[in-house]
Image (cartoon, rainbow, N blue to C red):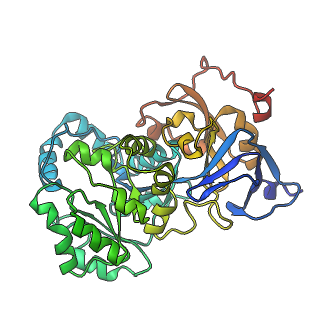
Amino acid sequence: MDTRSARTHASLCGAACVTRDGVTRAPLQIRGGRIDASLPAWAYRVDLRDHLIFPGLINAHDHLQVNAVPALDAGAFPNSYAWIEAFQSHFANPAVVAALRVPKATRLRHGGLKNLLAGTTCVAHHDPWHAALDDVDFPVALLRDHGWSYALGWTSYGPPVQQSFAQTPVDRPWIIHLAEGTDAVAEAELARLDELGCLAAHTVLVHGVGLREQDIDRILACGAGVVWCPSSNERLLGRTLQPRRLAETGRLALGTDSRLSGSRDLLEELRHAAVRCELSPQQLLGLVTDDSARLLRMPWHGTLQPGAHADLVIVEDRGGHEAWNLVGIERNQIRAVVRGGVPRIADPDFAEWFDVAGVETVRVVLDGRPKLLAKALADTAVLALEPGLELATARAAFTAPATIAEARC
């Protein structure tokens, strides 16, 4: 057997594979970073009895470079423009000054790692592109070749609205903050966007708090979509949109909007959405997998179909509805996050899989629990930005079994 081939071939056996469409129990086969229909008999076998496998999660809206910048005190602003104005004085805060002194490349990698730790393997970054995002070992996959503008009423940042929309191919998403507020200014934005000729099937609107029922009708009629960031909305604006109609038609995705204004990570955002009790477990799962992939035109993410990227979240099966085993857990309860067919962070008993995959690791502690992290992701400057994550000390001995099989003995 060719050892190099073995590193890219793995059969995940015994687990239930969970997507919005249902549950299957056939082994999940990984070949060369993709999910495949079959594998050679000699492929590395991972015993995942009593586990569930989900597609890697998609964060449909983040500003990766500001996840370590201290947040502005909450307040019920009428719209995002008032919040942006209030934030200008926040730049004088010594903690903010210090956070922004960290090189942008480091802050971007930190934003990527923050997502990966919580099972997010793909992110839509809503800011100008940076060379650091092209690093081959960047922690997560990123939405690429898309169009974007920042907001209708803030023209000093980002590409001009009509120009950017016109330059975006119709098979790629075009993203803009819209109706981010509760006042008349926010309520008027969808009509204004439509007047500019920028509302179409590939338009993705972020936030949408000020959308009215007739606005939702217009969005559904043209096939556009919305990214929902409830934590950020409720914290800054005092309310969020009603998600049901958009979710029922598959036109809604979930985003974190970064820690500057929103939740810690996508798992926390999922918990926040679940507490509202408006959506079913399948709908909640769809917001961070296949529905998000559809809105962002990323067909090979958010699914476990053959040909898809082998980006996975592995958790223990605690019983009950399968989706609730992911919705509601903390990030340190994830057993393994797999990207490109190999583990990137996992519990210590996955050590053999790291070895077979040729992934060198370091020992870390994540929110009090020991983990193995791919060494390529363990830049000390990046780790220093992430609360709850630290390199394991010599005294923090790992007592976990060396393999998954030993864990069950």
Position of residue 201 measured from the top left corner of the image (x, y, whole percent): 37, 77
Position of the C terminus, as image quadrant, is: top right
Looking at the image, the residue that sits furthest to the top is 395
How many numbered dots are placed on residues in this image?
0
The answer to whether residue 130 is seen in the rendering is no
Q: Position of residue 179 (x, y in %)?
A: 21, 61
Q: Is residue 235 left or right of residue 140?
A: left
Q: Nearer the viewer, residue 119 or 141?
A: 119
Q: Residue at x 23, y 74 (%)?
A: 161
The x, y position of residue 158, in whole percent, is 25, 66
Q: Nearer the viewer, residue 167 or 60?
A: 60
Residue 220 visible in the current orientation: yes
Camera-side residue of 309 and 3: 309
User: Along the horizontal axis of the image, is 241 left or right of 9?
Assistant: left
Q: Quadrant of residue 302?
A: bottom right
Q: Quadrant of residue 130?
A: bottom left
